[in-house]
Every structure is written in structure tokens, then in C-alpha cells.
Image (cartoon, grey):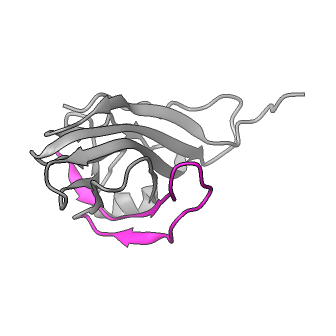
Amino acid sequence: MFNTNVNYENAIILLAPQDITNAETPSSYMKLDYAQEAGFLVVFGAITSATTADSILITVEACTAPAGTEVAVDFSYRISGALGTNTWGAKTAATSAGFSILNAVDNVMVWIDIDPAAIQADVTDALYARVFLSSPADMTACLVTVIGFTRPRYKQNTHKSATGAASA
């Protein structure tokens, strides 16, 4: 038996697994026009730095077109427990300034919730969102990938595309 209506999340790889040391790294854009709900799963591997206080800044940006001007927006997030556990921290609100993951927090996942309607209230006619990661100069390793998820407004026989474009 198979599902004749799409009523589950549509997953999109927005940043292939890579080392983002000493860089500002945007994911690709995720298109939100058919999304009732949307989120990002940011998966971290090893994070090391020459300075123990270093951290990776995570923000969410929205725009009206992939070649347009990005605006940082509010979101909420949860951080997973240690590798091999099935625990999650409390849901926490983040402002447009984002939040930071310390370099001592290896092998965790961050679930980011975004509300497409709230994003459009912040950025008129915003149709695209992405995750932006900033890694300081002292980082020696920061392995990460970003996966986007959308839940469609209405059941469909096939997913409407949530593919945006590569970040500029």
C-alpha cells in the first residue's frame, strides 16, 4: 500500500557535509511559497578550535528572490543531546541576531523552526529562507550539513518544489 497524498515533510539538502572552518557559510535557499511549516536540521560533527571560547554563530535569513537582499529573521531552535542519545533541549527563541554553538559541543543536531507567515511579516513577500553559519578564524575543524524540511499547506499527489537556489 502507498500514500496517494503527500502529507509528510519534503526534505532538501541545502548544505552538503563539509568543513566550514574560518568562513562565513550560507546554505542554499529553501523556497517557502507552498509551506505551511518549515524548518532546518543542522548536523554538526567535530568542532575544534585553538581558543576554547570560540563558537559558531547560526542565523536564519529570508529574501524575496535568491539574488535579492537577505534579512536576518527571528526563529526558534532546539539542540540535541550527546551522540547516541535521544534527548533534546527545550525550545528556545532566537532573535534575528541568531545564537551560538560553542566549539566544545561536538556531534549534535540543531532543529530550527521557522514560521513562513511570521517571516513574511518581517520581510514583505519573502519566499526564500536559508541558514547562515559564521565560523571564527581560530576554528580548526567544523564539520556541518544543513537539511531543509517543509510541510505543505495542502495534500498533493507529489511534492511542490521547495528548491530555491544556491546562495550568492
Residue 40 x/y as whole percent: 45, 47
Return the residue found at the far right: 1
The quarter of the rendered structure image containing the N terminus is top right
Residue range highlighted in magenta: 69-96
* Visible residue check, residue 80: yes
Q: Is residue 159 left or right of residue 27?
A: right
Q: Is residue 125 left or right of residue 138?
A: right
Return the residue found at the far left: 137
Residue 58 part of the magenta segment: no
Residue 83 x/y as whole percent: 52, 49
Residue 164 x/y as whole percent: 37, 32
On the image, which quarter does residue 47 sit in? top left
Give the residue displayed 18% in from the left and 56% down from the top. 54
Residue 55 x/y as whole percent: 22, 56
* Visible residue check, residue 34: no
Position of residue 52 relative to residue 154, above or below, is: below
